[in-house]
Structure formats: C-alpha cells, structure tokens
Amino acid sequence: MRSSSRFTVSARWLMFALLLGLSCFSAVPLARAEDAIPPDCEVFPERCLPEPIDVEISGRVTTPAGTGVGGVLLTIRRGGTGPIVDTVTTNANGDYVSLFTVFLTTGGYTVTPSKTCYRFNPQSRFVSAYGGSNVNFTALKCNRVADFDGDGKTDVSAWRPSNGTWYILRSSNSTYVTTQWGQSGDRPVPGDYDGDGKTDLAVFRPGTSADPNPNNGTWHMLRSSDGTSSAVTFGYNSDILVPGDYDGDGKTDLATFRPSDGNWYVLQSSDGVMSVVHWGLSGDRPVPGDYDGDGKTDRATFRPSDGVWYILQSSTLTPAYQYWGLSTDQLVPADYDGDGKTDVATWRSSDTIWYMFLSSTNAPAYQQWGVSGDVVAPGDYDGDGKTDQTVWRPSNGNWYILNSSTGSGVTIALGAPGDIPIPSANLP
C-alpha cells in the first residue's frame, strides 16, 4: 500500500510539471522560415529601404555692403563633385532655403553659387551630411572695364595713342605687360566681349575716305579667351561710344549713342540683333550703368542744361530722375557703396571733390581726392566690390588710389603725358 501511495504522488507531480512546461513553451512564438533568412529585396522592396532623412541648407548672398543679391543660383552636390541633389535661387533679399530628402548620410554636400557677371567669396562651401544654416556668400560684381587678369580688381593701365600700345600692371601678380593693339586715331573701348571675365583689348577705328563707308567706324577686338581677333563695322564716326552689357549675358555689347537723333544703337551679343532705343536729346551726355542692379546696363543721360540724370531702368522699362551735378563736372557713375547698383556721381575739378549720391542710402556722400588737372580713373582696385576714387596725374604719370577697404592712399607710377587711362576710357 505504501508503494502505491508513493507512485500516486509522483505521478501527480509529473503531470503538473508537464502541464507547466507546455504552458511556458506556448508563450514563446515559433520562428518563421521567412525570418531566418535576409528579406528578398526584389519581392519585398519595402523591407530593404532605409529610413528617409530630411536635409535643410539655408543662407544668404549679399554684397560686401550687406545688400541681398537676388537671382543667384545655388547648386548643391553630394560630396565635392558628386551628383546634384538640389538647386535653389535666392529671393530679392538674397535669402535661400534648400530642402531635400536622402536615404544615405555618408559624407556631406558642396554648395556653389553662380550668377552672370558675379564672382563669389568663397567660391563654394562644404556642409555636413545633416545640412546647416548660415551658409552665406559674398557676391562681387564682375569688373569688365580694366580687369585684364580676371582677378576681380581694376588693373592700373593705359593706352598710348602715339603707338597703339597698352601698358598694363596686373594686380594678380604685380607684373607689367605691354601689348600693341590699335593705331593713332583709334579710340580705346575696353570690355569683356567674349564673356570670360577678363577685359579684352579693343579699339574703335573711325572710317576714312579710303573706306567704302567713310562715315562708319569699325570695332577691333582681341579676345583674351583664345587670342583671336575680330572686326565689326558698327556706328558712325560722330557717335559717342557706350559699350556695356545691355542684354545681361555677361558679354560687352557694341553700342553707341547718336546725339543727332537721341538714339542708342546696341548690337546685342546674345542674339546678334541690333536694338534701337530713343533716350535723350541732342546735347545730352550718355552715362550708361546698372542703376537698378539687375545685371544689365541701363541707358541713361546727363543733361547739362538742367543738371538732371535721366535713367531708363532695364528691369521695369520705367524712367528714373536724379538732379545731381553741374554742367562743368566730370561724370563718374560707378558703384561706390558696393550694393551692386551704379551710383550717380561727379568730380569737380575746381574743388577736387567727388560728389556721390549713394543708391544704398539715397543720401549724398563726398570725398576730396585729386588736384586740378588730374584725369579721373575710378575702379575697384582693392577688389572689395566698391569703386575707389582714383586719379591719374599726367604731369608725373602717377596714379593716386584711395582704397575703400582701408581708407588709405596708394601711389603707382604708370604712363606718360598723352596716355589715356583705361579705367576712364568709357567715361563720358
């Protein structure tokens, strides 16, 4: 009897253990066959995609004076030379925001700005794989008047009518270069005719009695991009030469102002079409410049009889007027405040004061620089995006430059009596 009792107790405990084991085993899920091997990305592509990552890159593009520059294209590439992941354009205030989604965070991105006739500092910026803010750039407008080496600075330079030689001091490496281009009787018309960012040697040669059309002049240009030359007959001998970038393609257009009819004749480099616009009266002095900051040269005249500047803005085709200067003043329109717009300005030889009406503040500014008898030669000699007050003194061949970046003066010797300073060649 005792052995039977022991067997009964043991059997009960065995059954309880089996039931407990089955209960615990049923709580653990059984492994599935499809979980034991990597997913088939062709059959189940959704199982193989990584989580998407939103990237934001933002910043602002401004002139050295802090004015926003609109219409700048920002190209964003993976790494340094990888594929383009996004492009965005700055608004009128110079701001931009780029938003895009990626699935890989390896490396980072390179942001590169671009706009016709602008250079940027820095040229590009690297951003981490997760984006960034304050990715800012400074925009400097191209200097096509006397920047022969393309470094963004005006080069001290002169053209000698007696032998047709150009004398150039390159600001990039402080070396002197002389090139013969032109002849006695020519008129220098420097500009960036091939759009490579460097000023080309160019002269306008009036027609003579030996020519088929003696009243027509010919432009002779030596391209800096490939060293080839071209000659184009355009304009009358009596025309006032006003080369500029009227179509905004980054190339200097052949252009003249005809006092007899008040018309501007422009041969557009973008399409080869001649544009004729009436703006001005006989006796007006043409003062072309980019007064509205849209990257195109505006037709403008100064009327000595009333001292008013009449400006036809290319951005809106609406006129603007500014009373500024005396009939005897030397007209020196340029961008003195670095906001990307041409400022109305004159130099008065009687008191040697530069009278400027700044577009950034709509207020006057004054600077005494030079002596009576000097030749004005304004340009951006220090490359800060602002025009520097500069004069050339024929009596000693010295250039006197007032750098806007430091406020200090610099004296450089180049030229001889009778020379034409290149930065002043296209001034009215």
Image (cartoon, helix red, strand yellow):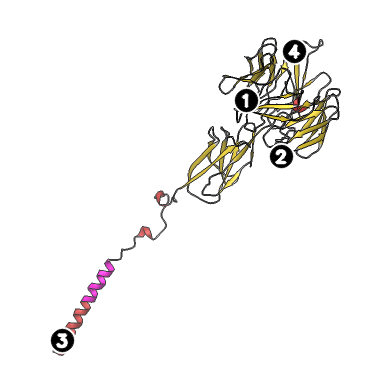
**Neighbourhood count class around disc 1 (C-alpha, 10 Å): few under 14, some 14–19, many 20 upward:** many
| Residue 255 drawn in magenta | no
Q: Neighbour class for label 4 at 10 Å: few (<14), some, many (≥20)? A: some
Front one among 272 and 162? 162
Please, what secondary structure does the residue beneath circle 3 have? Answer: helix
x and y, in percent, of residue 396 in the image? 86, 30
Q: Which of 92 and 11 is in front in this view?
A: 92
Label 3–label 2 contact, CB within 8 A? no
> Looking at this rendering, what residue extends furthest in the left direction?
1
Q: Name the residue under label 1.
A: 291
Q: Do the residues labelled 3 and 1 touch (CB within 8 Å)?
A: no
Q: Mark 4 points at which residue?
A: 238
Q: Residues within 10 Å of mark 2 (few under 14, many from 20)?
A: few
Circle nearer the N terminus (4, 3):
3
Whichever of labels 2 and 1 marks the residue nearer the N terminus, that label is 1
Q: What residue type is labelled 1?
A: Tyr
Which of label 4 and label 3 is nearer to you? 4
Residue mark closest to the camera, 3 vs 2:
2
Q: Which of 320 and 179 is in front in this view?
A: 320
Magenta stretch: give its range. 16-26
* Residue with the mark numbered 2: 406
Residue 165 location (% of width, % of height): 83, 27
Horizontally, residue 30 falls left or right of residue 216, namely: left
Instruction: Kindly identify the residue that appears in the image at 42 percent across and 57 percent down.
Output: 38
Whether residue 226 is visible, yes or no, is no
Q: Is mark 2 on a helix, strand or loop?
A: loop
Name the disc covering residue 4, or none.
3
Which comes sooner in the sequence, label 4 or label 2?
4
Alpha carbons under labels 4 and 3: distance apart? 138 Å
User: Residue lying furthest front in this view?
Assistant: 351
Report the amino acid beneath label 4. Ser
